[in-house]
Image: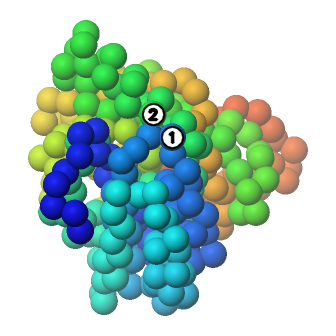
Amino acid sequence: MTSEIPANLLTVVMPNFNYGRFIAEAIGSVAAQTHSPIELIVVDDASTDDSVAVVRDTLPKMTNLFSTELLALEQNVGKLGALNRALPKVRGEYFIILDSDDLLTPEYAARCIAELTEARKADPSIGFIYTDCTLVSQAGELLDRGKSTAFDAKLLEEFSFVPEPALCLARAVVEAGPFDEAIRKGTKHHKWRRMVANGWNGQHLAEPLFYYRMHDKNLSGIGKRVIAEVENGQRGHRILSGYWPTQTTQR
């Protein structure tokens, strides 16, 4: 790893469990960002498929990234456990968690960093920017648009409406950790609530800037619901807070 840390470095942490069929494309979407520099940390959570082999084959090809690293865990610790293992390695000013089955549009980071910079001029408590998304099938076919809602700290106590990914100040995430590894569903809800409890607020950017893949293995269960709805002819925008679970230790 390079010891000198460049200005505006973005750290992307990508937790992964058995998404070998998706992860190369997710990594490629990080490398395709118009923003630079970027460091990418992939944390494989003891996958039993070919994930580690795919990552080891893919990372050396991402030559435009500032740095890449694979943490291959021997025991499964869950998404928040994987995030906790990556936190000590975070060197960026900015931070994104990207699930290994999802994709960023090329302008995601640049657009969100610009929005965050502008928002913090008026309100220094703004620590993260989150966006709407495009829902896609397992094969990457466009389905519908997924919508979030304007930030409301009180509403966040009851509903999960801030997606993964979101563009954060890295220190806001690091200071909120380590996260509770007993939480296995609603993990992002737990993380955002921790950050808000520390005094940080978010801001919604109502643009679909990432692709959220719908399949039967989505941790939140959203994929099964959306796929069934689409097959039944239910099309249109979806308010995602109605699909994502709040934090729970249930599996």
- The residue at 35%/75% (across/down) is 70
**Does label 1 or label 2 sit earlier along the sequence?**
1
Q: Which mark is residue 34?
A: 1
- The residue at 44%/46% (across/down) is 165
Horizontal and vertical percent position of residue 117: 31, 22
Q: Is 117 situated left or right of 107 in this image?
A: left
Quadrant position of residue 21: bottom right
* Coloration of the structure image: rainbow
Q: Is 134 situated left or right of 79 in this image?
A: right
Q: Is residue 125 above or below residue 173?
A: above
Can residue 234 be seen by looking at this rendering? yes
Horizontal and vertical percent position of residue 132: 56, 33
Q: Is residue 189 above or below residue 251?
A: above
Quadrant (top left, top right, bottom left, bottom right) of the C terminus: bottom left
* Circle 1 Cα neighbour tier, 10 Å, few/some/many (<14 / 14–19 / ≥20): some
Q: Amino acid at mark 1?
A: Thr
**Nearer the viewer's eye, disc 1 or disc 2?**
1
Secondary structure beneath label 2: helix
Count how many numbered circles sit on residues in the image: 2
Q: Is residue 116 above or below residue 180?
A: above
Quadrant position of residue 81: bottom left
Horizontal and vertical percent position of residue 247: 34, 52
Q: Amino acid at mark 2?
A: Ala
Q: Is residue 33 above or below residue 28?
A: above
Secondary structure beneath label 1: loop
Q: Is 123 situated left or right of 165 in this image?
A: left
Q: Is 127 situated left or right of 207 in this image?
A: left
Quadrant (top left, top right, bottom left, bottom right) of the N terminus: bottom left
The residue under label 2 is 110
Report how far apart the C-alphas of labels 1 and 2 lie in the structure. 6 Å
Q: Which mark is residue 9?
A: none
Horizontal and vertical percent position of residue 178: 15, 59
